[in-house]
Image (cartoon, grey):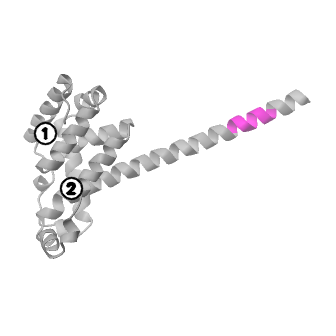
Amino acid sequence: MKNLTRLLCCAFFYVAGSTHAAVDSQNIKNQEQRSIDMARYAIVAAILIPKTESGRYLCAREQVACAGVNQGELAVLLLASRDSVAHLTALVSAIRFATDAGLSALLTCKIGEKGNSALKVVSSLTVKKLRKECEADFVEQTRRGTVFRELQVNDACRTEKQLEIKLGEIHKMLEGGMKCE
């Protein structure tokens, strides 16, 4: 009887622990996806808002609206701060966006800091896939409001030729072990 009680107790705690671990694992995945989605949204918004007439008007009228750290830069830092495969893939895949020089430099440096793990991701990406993902992000962003309707997809996305060049540059940087200062 004691053995049966011990066995039942062990089975209960094993199942309870497994269920709890599965729930925690799912919550972590959901939180991870939310942070990736927010970062992607912030990068696209940071690229598009200054390109719209109403965005430029807002920045001219209310300097506080456009002061401080760029939300795209914060998004890159968020993606780079996590060591998960999903965050690393999102970080490297962010090269699909037509970023300004400052954001592009930050993104390149953060990818460089990831070293060989980033090299594996870069090697697995295709220009066509990156372009399609960016086009989907652009469409999603333009559906959120009328302010972006005056823009074209190339306002947010690198062309396939630009992506090919950028992927090559990053691949070369990672293979050479170059780091940013």
Q: Residue 111: image x %, image y %?
A: 24, 36
Q: Are the two marked residues, 1 and 2, in contact with CB atoms closer than 8 angstroms? A: no
* Range of magenta residues: 8-15
- In the rendered structure, does residue 180 fall within the stretch colored magenta? no
Q: What is the magenta segment's predominant secondary structure?
A: helix
- Residue beneath label 1, please? 163
- Which secondary structure, mark 1? helix
- Residue beneath label 2, please? 138
- Residue that appears at 11% across and 48% down: 101
Q: Residue 112: image x %, image y %?
A: 23, 33
Q: Residues within 10 Å of mark 2 (few under 14, many from 20)?
A: many
Report which quarter residue 129 is drawn in.
top left
| Residue 139 showing in the rendered view | no
| Quarter of the image that includes the C terminus | top left
Q: Residues within 10 Å of mark 1 (few under 14, many from 20)?
A: many
Image side of residue 112 versus residue 32, left or right: left
Residue at the far left in the pictured view:
161
Tell me which amino acid carries mark 1: Leu
Q: Residue 95: image x %, image y %?
A: 19, 42
Q: Residue 128: image x %, image y %?
A: 17, 39
Number of marks drawn: 2
Does residue 164 sit above or below 73 in this rendering? above
**Real-space Cα distance between discs 1 and 2?**
16 Å
- Residue that appears at 12% across and 69% down: 56
